[in-house]
Image (tube, coloured by chain):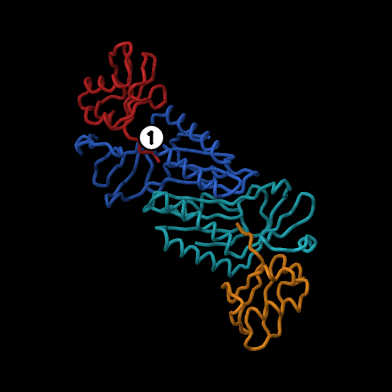
Chain colours: A blue, B cyan, C red, D orange
Amino acid sequence: MVELTDHPINADQITATVTSPNCGAVVLFLGTTRQFTDSRETVTLSYTAYAPMAQSQMEKLEDQAKARWPVDRCVMIHRLGEVPIGEASVAVAVSTPHRRDAFEAASWLMDRLKELVPVWKKEHWATGGTDWVHPGLVQSSEENRLQ
Amino acid sequence: MVELTDHPINADQITATVTSPNCGAVVLFLGTTRQFTDSRETVTLSYTAYAPMAQSQMEKLEDQAKARWPVDRCVMIHRLGEVPIGEASVAVAVSTPHRRDAFEAASWLMDRLKELVPVWKKEHWATGGTDWVHPGLVQSSEENRLQ
Amino acid sequence: MNVRVKLFALTQDLAGTDEVSLALPEDATVADVRSGLAKLVPALEAVLVGCAFAVNNEFATNDAPVNASDEIACLPPVSGG
Amino acid sequence: MNVRVKLFALTQDLAGTDEVSLALPEDATVADVRSGLAKLVPALEAVLVGCAFAVNNEFATNDAPVNASDEIACLPPVSGG
């Protein structure tokens, strides 16, 4: 199950969704908003997505994880819009018969999600500016601070 | 924070407890009760502990994980008494600045918990008998089915 | 033919719009979309080399053909998670 | 001296009690607790080789000394999680 949502992420609902009587292990990963990035203070983050592609990329990742590990149930949720400090922007959860597979599959899904799912983060700095986060993109700092 | 409890484990409460503004990653592991073990059907599981030692062993594991990884907050909970199928018997959660450490620390804590924390599981089989689970213990099957 | 290209995040801000239309030859590829975008919106030129492209919700390399009916997207480096 | 030994899970069922008292010499070790337990409760003999012992909430090897005031526990292989 994959989802893009404007609402807060509920851990209990996710773990209840993936828990299965065939499985002994559930791993949930939450990516949460940090207040400080290299000593710069963030007041909030916002996320935007290319929604149809983000959805289909996440569905593909779910299929690939299920082909590679004995994953019974899988949930991937990315929150969009403003995500206040300390709240979760992303959740990945899987259930498997044994725990090693659950840790591996959840970790793999997060690595791939961060590489392949078209979602973008904007930092809103305590000092007032904003920055789109585009890892590795070469640009002048003025260009990255248009809004 | 470590805890032995007779109550159901609440994932949301645990992830809220470990989430920290200094951390970008939360990993929660839940060990859940499986209905089938090698094709034998379980109706329920029950857990008993040597409580003071289980508590102190879990506290030591928390300290060791915090010494080895940049774990900000940590929760380990083991449920005791009857745990119905599909419910969690154990929860381990950590927050770290970056996700690789959170996966490693949570996985390590579960491995050590299963080795070192004096808690015992009893299977209640659909066929009516019960078995204490003592991995590697050599015994006649009559001895293991006293109750 | 005319193709429409969706823009996101920084590229959207730099172009001041979330979609542009490009006039391209019939046998155009993603490489032509790149160069067409750079010409139409000079502000994008410096960052396009770091952007990926998608055609119909799939990542597409420079040699992938594009058609007028395709949904084309310019994707600056992603930062979800 | 007399020491009390806590029993758990299968060992508790086999002994029919959650604690037994053993009479041991003053310089006794965990090894003496093992052999004393096996003598006092023959039903435990077959499984004691697979059990660990704890003294005051810490795992203790066979050569660890025990005192009358210690909390001693016989721990069959654990299966939490």
**In the displayed structure, would residue C33 be above or below residue B89?**
above
Query: Which one is in front, A3 or C53?
Result: C53
B9 vs B51: above or below: above
Of the 4 image quadrants, the one containing the C terminus of chain C is: top left
Q: Quadrant of residue C41?
A: top left
Q: Look at label 1 and name its amino acid.
A: Val
Q: Position of residue D47 (x, y in %)?
A: 72, 68
Q: Position of residue B122 (x, y in %)?
A: 70, 58
Q: Dividing the image into 4 quarters, which one contains the N terminus of chain C?
A: top left
Left or right: D25 as drawn, with respect to A2: right
Q: Is residue B35 above or below residue C38?
A: below
- Residue name at image x 35 percent, y 35 percent: C78
Q: Which residue is disc 1 drawn over?
A: A119
Residue A146 position within the rendered picture, expressed as x and y whole percent measured from the top left:
22, 34
Residue B23 in the image, given as x and y percentages of width and height:
39, 52
Q: Look at 67% across and 82% down and name the residue there.
A: D3
Residue depicted at x 49% and y 54%: B106
Label 1 secondary element: strand
The correct choice, above or below, for C43 with respect to D70 in the image is above
Quarter-wise, where is residue B80 in the image? bottom right
